[in-house]
Amino acid sequence: MSRGKTFGIWFDFKIQPDNEWIILFERLIKAGIKECFINANVEQLEYLISLTKNYDLNIHGWVWTLNRPYDKTTIKNLDWYSINRNGQNCYDFRPYVDYYQWLSPFSEGARDYIANNILQIAKIEGIASVHLDYVRFCDVYLPENLQKYYKINQTHEFPEFDFGYHPNGRKAFKKRYGVDPLEIQDEMLIKKWKQFRCDAVTHLVSKLKLIAKNNNTQISAAVFPYPEMSKEMVLQDWSTWKLDIICPMNYHHFYNGDINWIAESVEKGIKHKDLNGKYLSGLFLGALTPSELKQAINKSLEKGADGVSLFSNDQLTEEHIKVLKSFN
């Protein structure tokens, strides 16, 4: 992809006539949106690529990576799921919401299953990238405003939300450091256990990057705003991933922030992007008026972002489109 300002958008596939899709795509083109991160299966992605072959649009395969709700394959393999500090399996105990059903990056079976999912998308002719989402652990901490929404006050790490205690992970950590993570008391070992889990996610991403590369496909990801935050909140250290496109979800209202919070987040995260890759500042359309969207885009670009990605198409109004067109 060429350098310069880039606009993207996330949306889910839905069954509708060809002409409805064409109307949508022409609407996105009018807004200057080129990158389409679409939650869809292989057949659906192939269909959309065929529909857009005469349009200046890129179709990306948006994948729920480690969070696999209602997956008919994974529910037959309960040993693939992540386990919290209380010993609860994430299929049986679903933290916060029912669709939180997290696999463990320490499970070989889970890793192989995920790798195969990525391979099927990477092999699609014309796919712009494999787009990883939920490539992390379950939230140890929720953002401030979501804690209010779910009526939770997370003053410390609650064991029911602290995941990563899969037997394989505990065994590997004990082999390296001589102690079971469930028995850690030393502050330095606590930090090492946190990094150990971050590294498990990073190793999975490295494996998926190789699959994409071997199929001449780019790889992108939606991540938490910046690594210092993501490591603490969701055990995701994307600082070393070096992807083709990184989309930090700078959803300011989750953190009780304003437009300046977005600028600060971009400034903290931009230094971790790959030099040859793109940083698209993820913006939550439902929390931005048209004038605020303009400010958020300007602030993101001023801090070095290559563009923005918008969540989501369902919230894209004609007023938002007028703002986006002003940047064309």
Image: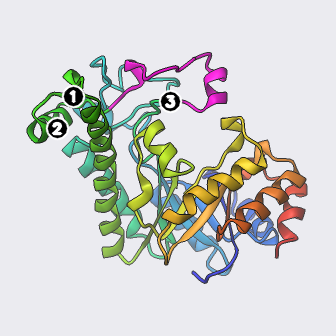
The answer for how far apart the CA atoms under marks 2 and 3 are is 23 Å
Magenta stretch, overall SS: loop
Q: Residue 109: in sight, yes or no? A: yes
Residue at 65% in and 74% down? 57
Q: Earlier in the sequence, mark 2 or mark 1?
A: 2
| Element under disc 2 | helix
The range drawn in magenta is: 141-163
- Please state, as top left, top right, bottom left or bottom right, where the C terminus lies in the image: bottom right
User: Could you classify mark 2 by the number of other residues whose Cα lies within 10 Å: few (under 14), some (14-19), or many (20 or more)?
Assistant: some
* Residue identifier under label 2: 173
Residue closer to the observer: 62 or 189:
189
Location of residue 258 in the rendering, given as x and y in whole percent from the top left corner: 77, 43
Mark 2: amino acid:
Phe
* Residue identifier under label 3: 141
Mark 3: amino acid:
Tyr
In the displayed structure, 282 sits above or below 160; it is: below
| Element under disc 3 | loop
Q: Earlier in the sequence, mark 2 or mark 3?
A: 3
Q: What number is the disc on residue 112?
A: none
Q: Is residue 168 left or right of residue 64?
A: left
Which quadrant of the structure image shows residue 20?
Answer: bottom right
Residue at 63% in and 58% down? 266
* Residue identifier under label 1: 181
Mark 1: amino acid:
Pro
Which quadrant of the structure image shows residue 263?
Answer: bottom right
Q: Earlier in the sequence, mark 1 or mark 3?
A: 3
The answer for how far apart the CA atoms under marks 2 and 1 are is 7 Å
In magenta stretch: residue 152: yes
In magenta stretch: residue 289: no
